[in-house]
């Protein structure tokens, strides 16, 4: 071996072993490893980055995980003068084969721990010359580890996915199972293979909302990553500052489109679109560039499951379930038009149209509910318009009953603090209009996800402004208060000044959990000290006893 190559190899190897020993200690100390992860390290790169003013005044860089394009977390070494003796031929014929041989030997042992190396390893050498760059790559595969992982996955699917509840997978396994599904070493990258497993686990986790939410997030992220790196990168070059502009490669530089891969990509586009509508639109448009007639149909008319165009007496409408959009044009601003539009929406939802749709509305009426926290969207405008017609209240309530779904959000705004659960505008409007719909309002408040939705937090003030603080309605008011965010704000217009009000509040609170009592009382009185002050100032005297009972709740 060339002396310069030998020194370069030994210097790199010594530093790499120091890094690996440190990382091995960290990995061994990790708790709650998933059995679906056979190892962690799957990448190692050695680079020579030339100097800014002189080629030989550079640094050796070592990466033990694949770095992001915008970051530099390499370990750096300053070499001796031997670097100028290296040639591209020496790197190709001597250094890189020797480095790969050493790595292969280490890779197939458990010297650094059983979980240190994954079943696959990529070794990269990048060497910058004065006016060029050498890049060499080698893939290592530990067949026995791969086989062990395949067997573990098979057992996991049998025991944790296909089995009946209450047997559920552990949260830490969901991440690795999701990314296993889009790994061609582990599963055929075909929709008929992957979709049933996603659907089965999604349905099974319905009994555990937290796990279901985690699973949905994990598999959506995994399949979106596959869509970019496993599919689009074959056909498009990424450009722009954030590499989010896709430019079709020349025909000779891209492979033929595999039909099964395209089916999976279109599935990914639709699934990711539930939370990222713009990504869905982009993916479908890119698929059209690749010649997909199905993507073209999705963009134009949807999946075909729903009649895409409606022509009525007073309303024209269209829908696209793939884009999750509904377009309504009110031809005549009368009660019958909104009744017709509501019938159209109810029918679509009953047929299975996505509840988190976005509404496009053409209407000359521009009403809004007296709730500042709600987005001033077309969907909000539509229901505020419809709520001006009391005869439509039962139909609006029917819509709300069909639309309400926990852990779902309308697509009328970008995901934000303005996002609301389907049925929100209908229910909150009805709750201000009539006591008849208080049961519906209470059901909504019990269903709403207070951890991820905050727009309803200000509803209590609007409710009191309309209905006051009536003893008979105290359970409803408490339901509204509990439907606010966990750190609910004090509702300043709630005044407990009559014995009957305080007694009704005591009765409504006595069967609640301690934390619920505390939340309600903090939203009404702000603090224990202020409630104590209210007790001391209580007039008439009959007000003092129920207020003291409230104080004992804290």
Image: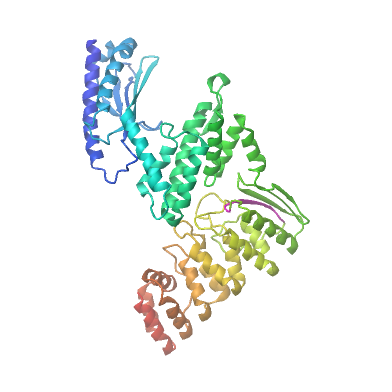
Q: Based on the picture, tell me whether residue 212 belongs to the magenta stretch.
A: no
| Left or right: 62 as drawn, with respect to 449 | left
Where does the N terminus fall, quadrant-wise? Answer: top left
x and y percentages locating residue 401 in the rendered image:
59, 63
Relative image position of residue 360 (x, y in whole percent): 65, 50
Residue at position x 22%, y 11% from top? 3
Answer yes or no: is residue 489 visible.
Answer: yes
Residue toward you, 169 or 265: 169
The tally of labels here is 0
Residue 415's place in the image compared with 491, above or below, is above
**Is residue 52 visible in the rendered structure shown here?**
no
Pinpoint residue 477: horizontal percent, then vertical percent.
Answer: 50, 73
Q: Residue placed at 45% from the left, 42% from the top?
A: 221
Q: Residue at 27% across / 11% down in the picture?
A: 85
Q: Is residue 379 above or below residue 107?
A: below
Q: Quadrant of residue 184?
A: top left
Residue 102, quarter of the rendered image: top left
Q: Quadrant of residue 73?
A: top left
Q: Quadrant of the C terminus?
A: bottom left
Colour approach in the figure: rainbow
Q: From which residue to which does the magenta span run?
A: 355-363
Q: Is residue 202 left or right of residue 21?
A: right
Q: Is residue 356 magenta?
A: yes
Q: Spot the residue most to the bottom.
A: 541
Question: Along the line of sight, which residue is nearer the eye, 364 or 51?
Answer: 364
As drawn, is 464 to the left or to the right of 76? right
Q: Position of residue 444 (x, y in %)?
A: 53, 64
């Amino acid at each position: 071996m060339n002396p310069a190559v030998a020194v370069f190899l030994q210097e790199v190897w010594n530093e790499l072993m120091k890094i690996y020993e440190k990382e091995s200690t960290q990995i061994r100390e990790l708790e709650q490893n998933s059995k679906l992860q056979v190892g962690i390290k799957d990448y190692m790169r050695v680079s020579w980055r030339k100097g800014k003013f002189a080629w030989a005044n550079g640094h050796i860089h070592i990466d033990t995980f694949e770095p992001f394009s915008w970051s530099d977390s390499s370990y750096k070494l300053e070499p001796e003068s031997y670097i100028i003796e290296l040639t591209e031929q020496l790197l190709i014929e001597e250094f890189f084969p020797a480095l790969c041989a050493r790595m292969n030997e280490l890779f197939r042992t458990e010297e650094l721990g059983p979980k240190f190396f994954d079943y696959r390893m990529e070794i990269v050498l990048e060497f910058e010359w004065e006016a060029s760059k050498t890049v060499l790559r080698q893939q290592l595969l530990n067949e026995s580890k791969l086989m062990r992982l395949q067997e573990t996955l098979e057992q996991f699917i049998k025991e944790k996915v296909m089995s009946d509840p209450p047997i559920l997978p552990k949260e830490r396994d969901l991440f690795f199972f999701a990314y296993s599904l889009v790994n061609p070493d582990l599963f055929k990258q075909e929709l008929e293979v992957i979709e049933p497993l996603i659907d089965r686990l999604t349905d099974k986790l319905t009994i555990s909302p937290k796990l279901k939410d985690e699973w949905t997030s994990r598999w959506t992220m995994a399949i979106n990553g596959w869509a970019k790196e496993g599919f689009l990168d074959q056909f498009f070059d990424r450009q722009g500052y954030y590499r989010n502009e896709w430019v079709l490669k020349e025909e000779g530089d891209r492979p033929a489109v595999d039909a099964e891969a395209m089916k999976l990509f279109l599935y990914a586009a639709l699934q990711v679109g539930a939370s990222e509508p713009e990504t869905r639109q982009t993916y479908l448009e890119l698929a059209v560039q690749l010649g997909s007639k199905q993507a073209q149909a999705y963009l134009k008319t949807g999946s075909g499951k729903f009649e895409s165009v409606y022509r009525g007496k007073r309303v024209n409408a269209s829908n696209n379930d793939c884009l999750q959009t509904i377009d309504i044009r009110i031809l005549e601003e009368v009660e019958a038009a909104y009744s017709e539009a509501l019938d159209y929406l109810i029918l679509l939802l009953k047929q299975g149209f996505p509840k988190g749709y976005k509404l496009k509305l053409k209407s000359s009426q521009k009403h809004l509910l007296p709730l500042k926290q709600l987005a001033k969207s077309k969907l909000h405008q539509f229901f505020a318009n419809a709520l001006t017609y009391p005869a439509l209240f039962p139909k609006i309530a029917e819509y709300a009953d069909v639309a309400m779904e926990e852990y779902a959000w309308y697509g009328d705004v970008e995901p934000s603090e303005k996002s609301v659960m389907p049925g929100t505008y209908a229910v909150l409007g009805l709750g201000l209009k009539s006591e008849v719909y208080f049961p519906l309002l209470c059901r909504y408040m019990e269903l709403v996800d207070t951890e991820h939705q905050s727009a309803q937090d200000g509803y209590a003030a609007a409710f009191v402004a309309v209905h006051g603080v009536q003893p008979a309605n105290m359970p409803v008011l408490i339901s509204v208060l509990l439907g606010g965010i966990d750190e609910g704000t004090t509702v300043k217009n709630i005044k407990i000044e009559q014995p009957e009000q305080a007694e009704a509040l005591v009765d409504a609170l006595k069967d609640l959990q301690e934390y619920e009592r505390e939340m309600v009382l903090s939203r009404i009185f702000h603090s224990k000290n202020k409630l104590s002050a209210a007790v001391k100032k209580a007039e008439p005297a009959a007000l003092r006893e129920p207020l003291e009972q409230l104080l004992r709740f804290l």
